[in-house]
Amino acid sequence: MSTNSPGPYCIFCEKELTNAVLKNILKNESSYDIYECDKCAIAMLHPFPTDEELKKLYSCGNYRTGAGKRFGFLIEFLIHLERIRKRRRINQFIKPGKILDIGCGRGLFLDVMRRGGWNTIGTELNEETASYAIKTYDSKIFMGDIIQHKLPAESLDAVNINQVLEHLKNPHKVIEESHRLLRKDGILIISVPDLRSPQFTIGKENWFLLDLPYHLFHFTEEGLSKVLKKNKFKIKHIKRLSLEMCPFGWLQTLLNVSGIRFNLLYDLLKSSELKAGEMAPIGPGGIIATLLLLPIYFPLALALSVLEPLIWKRGGSIEVYAQKIVP
């Protein structure tokens, strides 16, 4: 990690960042801080990993398998069902047309949307994962940053950015480009963790969805809403309970706070290919402690996932539906 990186500045308003949310978080033998912009209500990692470090972090066999999967059959099946539920939600806001999935991974969401009558395209940074999507689902995938491809303006009905925006070095530019690509009244769907959720308040550096150093930006519901409105989007709906993200986010955070080896349960659930990669050692003591705490923490995690949006009007992960406004 480079030690001479410049001080942090907000990429959304260019203000110097002085509000340190977290300091000196050690990951992969490097130390990171998180600074929040008081004006934009969005935080960022400092310093960013280098391009070489990011490439290694996202390599197949480390972050995901060559097929883009992270878990065993049962969890992957539940993820598939959640994608179908998301298609139904999107159809409530706009009829089937052409949709772009930014950071499409193995192409599962694109396939689900295509089977529902949508015309689909995607972008993906990892070439091996994109190749899987192309071969398996016959999907049209653009490699790299969506901005570099200069797709026709107003050519899309919907853009989906699911748990991806926080990974990008240029989220502001991607939102601007999404506005350019969408037709009038087109829908932008963005899913991100919420830094002001009770999950973070309790977990801090142990919050599962903090996911350092993969997450370069850390959004709040207020901050994401601000930047969308600034880019001429109207917020139509905010979904604060994600069955895919919130219960497990709470569960793993509670286990982390309890002092069990960091993200142990998450690692145990990974596919065998990822388990064979670079992972911290798994000792029997941690497994026994996890098994003993699961009967207590699992129902508690479910309850807290429901209470977050009901009582605190928050969600560990939020899904924002925004409509393009044309003056």
Image: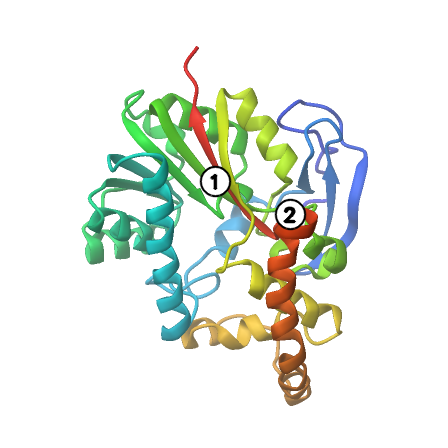
Classed neighbour count for the residue bearing mark 1: other residues with Cα under 10 Å, few (<14), some (14–19), many (≥20): many
x, y (%) of residue 18? 81, 33
Residue 257 vs 119, above or below: the answer is: below
- Three-letter amino acid code of the residue under disc 2: Arg
> Sequence order check: which comes first, mark 2 or mark 1?
1
- Between label 2 and label 1, give the one nearer the viewer: 2
**C-alpha separation, residue under disc 2 versus residue under disc 1:** 16 Å
Residue at image x 28%, y 22%?
Answer: 152
Hey, which quadrant is residue 13 in on the image? top right
x, y (%) of residue 32? 72, 50
Classed neighbour count for the residue bearing mark 2: other residues with Cα under 10 Å, few (<14), some (14–19), many (≥20): many
Residue in the foreground of this view, choosing between 242 and 57: 242
Residue at image x 70%, y 45%?
Answer: 196
- Three-letter amino acid code of the residue under disc 1: Ile
Q: Would residue 157 be seen by someone viewing this image from the given angle?
A: yes
Q: Is residue 155 left or right of residue 65?
A: left
Residue at image x 75%, y 27%?
Answer: 16
The residue identified by callout 1 is 190
Hey, which quadrant is residue 166 in on the image? top right
Query: Furthest-top residue in view?
Result: 327
x, y (%) of residue 249? 60, 62
Residue at image x 51%, y 55%?
Answer: 242
